[in-house]
Amino acid sequence: MAEYKGINGFTLQDLATDPTINTGQVWYNSATRIIKLHSATAAAVWASGNALNTARYELGSAGTQTATLAFGGDIPGGHTANSEEYNGTSWSEGNNLGTSRYYLRGAGTQTAGLGFAGYIYPGSWKNNTEEYNGTSWSPQNNMGTARRSPGSGGTQTAGLAFGGNKSPGGALSNDTEEYGGTSWTTGGSLNTARVYLGGAGTLTAGLAFGGYTTANVAVTEEYDGTSWVNSNNMNTTRARVAGAGIQTSAIGFGGLTPANPAYTGVTEQYDGTSWANSTSLTTARRSAGGAGTTAAGIAFGGNAPPHTTATEEFTGADIPLVQTVTTS
Amino acid sequence: MAKKYQYIVAENWGKGFIEINDATKFTISGFPGDVWRVPARDKRANLWINKVLGVIKTKNEAQAIVDALVETAQNNYDAQSDAYKAQHGRPTDIPLEE
């Protein structure tokens, strides 16, 4: 059998701590007595994270994979004001929203979050806006149009809401509103009015994808801060899709498709021009929360059915990682 | 015909249940009721099943677990008012592959 030294010209390094990432490097960690190597993900992967404390779907979400915010949503038998924070390992309870509701959306970060829109059954569309400062939620000026399940993007001081449905009777909306940190102003209209769509990006570089008109759609639109233009469709037609990332590097995952089974875990990645299939969520679900980037994203909650607490962490392709060498 | 998949039941304990090192080696799919599907006759998948203390189920047994949860969700939906139904979709069946 060939020896490591014979192949590489030097012996395996004996290190007390793991070294800085250097793809291809192999070493023996003397503290844990494990042989390790630096490699990179060949393809994107979803790995399990610790569960939400409260199972929910059609919730608000914001933040990153290691500093995530989940709030509101549909729970068995009603809606919740519950708010939770994820630190990359586990979810912990935060202070509740001021207005309990489902079908709301979010933007921003865990310490500067924005929650807006929503619905309370029966027939109460919401225009409530609340800001989160990392500790508590405070009410802000209302949206111009009360709506449920719009797309969202941006930050607490530069937020974006688009589409959804509205009173009376759940009429489809193509309305866009921009939040400047104090109040909402009207933006350019979506080309396709729809609800249950995915969103990503910023106020001046937003992305809308999927959704429902009178049927599920795969439509993609890009926003430049003034107007929406159509881009290439998603590969999988779907509504109730979650999203993360920016306009030139986004992921859309989960949702409901016209196929059977309707629940999908399909993940697609957008490069600013077109969508390509990526690795699917482990658990197919609709109406999940989503946050983060295409390198480090996160999905949480949703309906599989039933309401789920499941969290999954997305690691993009070509991301360095430490692996352990095992024998079997 | 050889089976393409095998099904197990295992409690998802969260972080570490499915690690990046697992997900890069084979495809794991989750379903209601802590039902998981992995490739059949796959050594790496079998190692993961051992790790998560998975209990092997036939496809029909796994389907019954999934169906029971979906049926409960459907019954809950059917008991709601028409106004509620107009704003919510009815949970759909989830057929498992052999």
Image: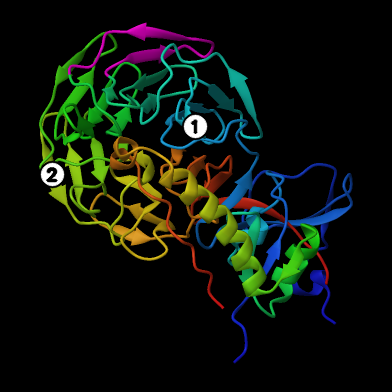
Q: For the point 52% across and 35% down, which residue is it?
A: A76
Tell me the magenta residue range: A127-144
- For residue B26, say whether it is visible: no
The answer to whether residue A178 is magenta is no
Q: How is the image coloured?
A: rainbow
Q: Amino acid at mark 1?
A: Gly
Q: Tell me if A124 is positioned left or right of A318 in this view.
A: left
Q: Which residue is mark 2?
A: A192
Real-space CA distance between mark 2 and mark 1, rounded to the nearest whole angstrom: 32 Å
Q: Position of residue B84 (x, y in %)?
A: 34, 36
The correct choice, above or below, for B25 with respect to B71 in the image is below
Q: Nearer the viewer, residue A75 or A97?
A: A75
Q: Which label sits in the foreground, 2 or 1? A: 1
Amino acid type, label 2: Thr
| Residue A204, above or below A243 | above
Q: Is A83 rendered above or below residue A257? A: above
Q: Is residue A141 magenta?
A: yes
Residue at 89% over, 48% down: A30
Which chain does the residue under circle 1 lie in?
A: A
The secondary element bearing badge 2 is classed as loop
Give the quadrant of residue A151.
top left
Mark 1, secondary structure of its residue: loop
Q: Quadrant of residue A26?
A: bottom right
Residue A206 place in picture, x, y as percent: 24, 36
Horizontal and vertical percent for residue A12? 82, 60
Marked residue nearer the N-terminal end (2 or 1): 1
Chain of the residue under the numbered disc 2 shown in the image: A
